[in-house]
């Protein structure tokens, strides 16, 4: 009986074949695009699901087709951030009665670059697949804040801890966009993210980082021709 992980990879294989076949029938157009997208990221694998947590985020990417292979191959450059922890704990000083907040944030940053196959013609439905190398940053910080009720800008903030770790990784992506008049595209898809190494712990109270994540994204993009006008 197939596990959910084996079914996932079988689905990846089937969709990749579909992308390669579909791109052969796409009319060459050769226009790139700039896109913004939202992210839902969840740990992948049994251990990750037990000890890590999902997060929400967003990203920006640029897709630039190779001129000689405008409907088959493009380069992708992107940056994204996903929040894995955002927590505020309130305390009250016993002597002064002042409210004090301890704020903790943990973010997952990715800068990625790689090729993308398919989905660059002038058709309405444009499937694509990609393989990207990535530089991944894990950041965890904790601040202590004494608020000012009259003027938020006058609050007192002290950083207790800030730690950032950087590692290399990669992702496999499958997606599809709907191309409206070769100007605007609505895009969605999924990615498998893998880091080659991860920090054991970024600090007390931080979320344990797992090397594998599964990501669903949805966004909108604008063709390069929109910015030339």
Image (cartoon, rainbow, N blue to C red):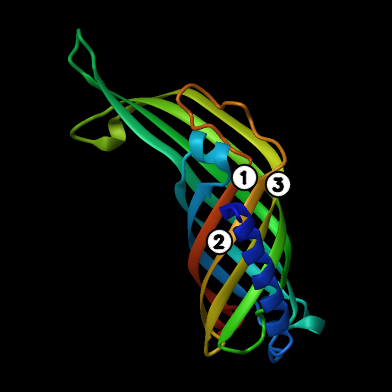
Spot the residue most to the front: 1
The residue under label 1 is: 212
Q: Where is residue 144 in the image (x, y as percent from the top left)?
A: 37, 23
Q: Check the picture and name the quadrant holding the N terminus.
A: bottom right
Q: Distance between the residues labelled 3 and 2?
A: 18 Å
Q: Residue at x 67, y 78 (%)?
A: 18
Q: Are discs 1 and 3 less than 8 Å apart at CB?
A: no
Q: Position of residue 79 (x, y in %)?
A: 60, 55
The quarter holding residue 127 reads bottom right
Q: Which of 154 and 47 is in front in this view?
A: 47
Q: How far apart are marks 1 and 3 (CA)?
A: 10 Å
Disc 2 on helix, strand or loop? strand
Q: Which of marks 2 and 1 is nearer the N terminus?
A: 2
Q: Is residue 111 above or below residue 229?
A: above
Q: In this view, does 14 lie above or below 45?
A: below
The quarter holding residue 175 reads bottom right
Q: Is residue 28 above or below residue 38?
A: below
Please tell me whether mark 3 or mark 2 is closer to you in this view: 3
Q: Which residue is drawn at 65% across and 59% down?
A: 9
Q: Are discs 3 and 2 less than 8 Å apart at CB?
A: no
Q: Position of residue 80 (x, y in %)?
A: 56, 53
Q: Which of marks 1 and 3 is nearer the N terminus?
A: 3
Q: Position of residue 36 (x, y in %)?
A: 51, 65
Q: Are discs 2 and 1 less than 8 Å apart at CB?
A: no
Please tell me whether mark 2 or mark 1 is closer to you in this view: 1
What count of labels does the image hold? 3
Q: Neighbour class for label 2 at 10 Å: few (<14), some, many (≥20)?
A: some
Judge left or right: residue 188 versus residue 117: left
The residue under label 3 is: 169
- The label number, if any, that marks residue 60 in the structure image: 2
Q: Which of 31 and 115 is in front in this view?
A: 115
Q: Neighbour class for label 1 at 10 Å: few (<14), some, many (≥20)?
A: some
């Amino acid at each position: 009986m197939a596990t959910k992980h084996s079914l996932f990879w079988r689905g990846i294989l089937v969709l990749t074949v579909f992308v390669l076949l579909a791109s052969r029938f796409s009319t060459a157009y050769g226009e790139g695009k700039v896109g913004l997208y939202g992210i839902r990221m969840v740990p992948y694998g049994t251990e990750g699901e037990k000890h890590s947590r999902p997060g929400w985020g967003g990203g920006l990417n640029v897709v630039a087709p190779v001129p000689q292979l405008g409907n088959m191959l493009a380069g992708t450059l992107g940056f994204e951030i996903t929040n894995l922890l955002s927590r505020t704990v309130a305390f009250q000083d016993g002597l002064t009665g002042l409210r004090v907040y301890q704020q903790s944030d943990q973010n997952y940053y990715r800068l990625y670059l790689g090729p993308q196959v398919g989905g660059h013609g002038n058709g309405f439905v444009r499937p694509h697949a990609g393989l990207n190398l990535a530089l991944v940053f894990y950041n965890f910080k904790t601040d202590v804040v004494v608020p000012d009720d009259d003027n938020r800008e006058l609050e007192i903030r002290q950083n207790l801890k800030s730690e950032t770790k950087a590692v290399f990784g990669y992702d496999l992506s499958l997606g599809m966009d709907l191309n409206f008049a070769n100007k605007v595209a609505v895009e969605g898809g999924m990615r498998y993210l893998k880091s080659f190494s991860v920090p054991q712990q970024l600090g007390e109270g931080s979320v344990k980082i797992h090397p594998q994540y599964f990501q669903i994204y949805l966004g909108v993009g604008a063709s390069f021709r929109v910015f030339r006008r």
